[in-house]
Image (spheres, rainbow, N blue to C red):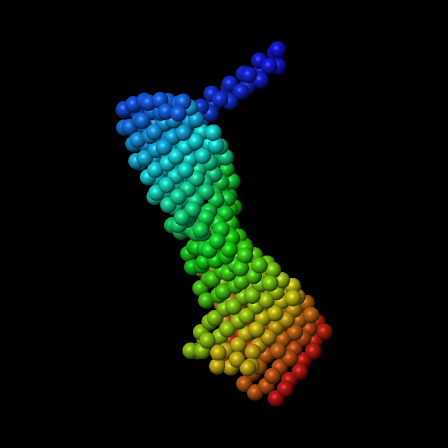
Amino acid sequence: MRKKNIAIFIITIFAITFALELINANSNSNRFENGTIVSVLSGDVEFLWNDARIFSDTTVWRRGNGHLLMTGNIKVFREKQELNCDTAEFRSNDKKLQLRGNVFAVDTSYLATMFSEKADYFLKNDSVFLYQNPRIHFWDKTSPDTITVFGKTINYASETGIARAADSVRVVGKDFFSVADTGYYFAKNQTAMTVGNPKIVQENSEVSGDTIHIIFRENVLDEFFVVGNPLGKTKEVENGDSVFMEMVGDTLRFLIEDGKISQILSEKNASITRFREENKERPDKMWGEKITTTIDCQDCGDNKISSVVEGSAKAIYYDQKSKNESSGDTLKLFFDDNGVSKIIISGKVKGRLEE
């Protein structure tokens, strides 16, 4: 008998905790319909469900099944969330708010602001499913910059700060954007990931692969790396001529400083091809287990770029008169406006020159 009383007590407490409670309405008219009382409420209508306060101008309340149909100035407040829309429907049995029209939501836990035309808000697990032109802005109190996530649909969980966007995904920030079939943003550690035909564009660089990981610092792009069949392409202008560079490897990593790429790391089965638009048939090429390329090299004299090739290193490069081949354990190549200006070879040195 005691066990039965305890069970009844637990069920009662649960029911009380999640009861739908009318707090205020300036006007209330009731009717009996299909075996339940239907209340038509208007004027500063307020309900309480657990810790959620729900406001509207007008609400039709079917008391028997805890169903609310709300119109006009819908507002939902929780400790760290706020939601607004034109109309909403709530069913207490599935603990879901269906929000429609000019949906706007804020989560101060992870500084996220959400917009869409339609959304479903699941009160029990504190998550939002946004659809019909959805987007989420992630902001930082110390920075004027934001990271914005777009997609045909977006799921956002307030407990973890994780957003998942699907179909026609775009992750956009200052000086970059990434597109993919699926995208994730992790607010807790300020990182993003795009998968399914992903591509990232940063200034004059474009990189694609299987998976792209993007890392931010105060909502500014700090670095990104591509895993699985990466292909990187950059374009620069030197002396009025376009210079292209293509990079591959098992992984490509790009480090950013002051909004510009400062260093590129190609790791495992790495290779880089560099050529001028007017001289495509004479490309400079490098191969190795790892290639570290520094852009706007500060310690390279008049040279703008340096590349360090490590592990079974090999390079083919051209000057105005000849084709050169070099190999060794490590190669360090320096580039100026005219191409390779200097090369340093160490370990198992080999070289060949063709006029």
> Is residue 262 at all visible to an observer of this figure?
no
Residue 319 lies, with reference to residue 105, above or below; the image says below
- Residue 66's spot in the image, x, y percent? 42, 27
The quadrant the C terminus occupies is bottom right
Residue 64 lies, with reference to residue 90, above or below; the image says above
Give the image quarter of residue 5.
top right
Residue reaching furthest bottom? Answer: 355
Residue reaching furthest top? Answer: 1
Residue reaching furthest right? Answer: 348
> Is residue 93 at all visible to an observer of this figure?
yes
Residue located 39% across and 25% down the image: 34
- Residue 199's spot in the image, x, y percent? 51, 60
Q: Nearer the viewer, residue 73 or 110?
A: 73
Q: Nearer the viewer, residue 344 or 153?
A: 153
- Residue 318's spot in the image, x, y percent? 57, 81
The quadrant the N terminus occupies is top right
- Residue 102's spot in the image, x, y percent? 34, 43
Residue located 69% across and 78% down the image: 350
Residue located 52% across and 63% down the image: 207
Give the image quarter of residue 82.
top left
Please tell me how many numbered marks the rendered image carries. Answer: 0
Q: Nearer the viewer, residue 179 or 12?
A: 12
Residue 318 lies, with reference to residue 155, above or below; the image says below
Residue located 61% across and 11% down the image: 2
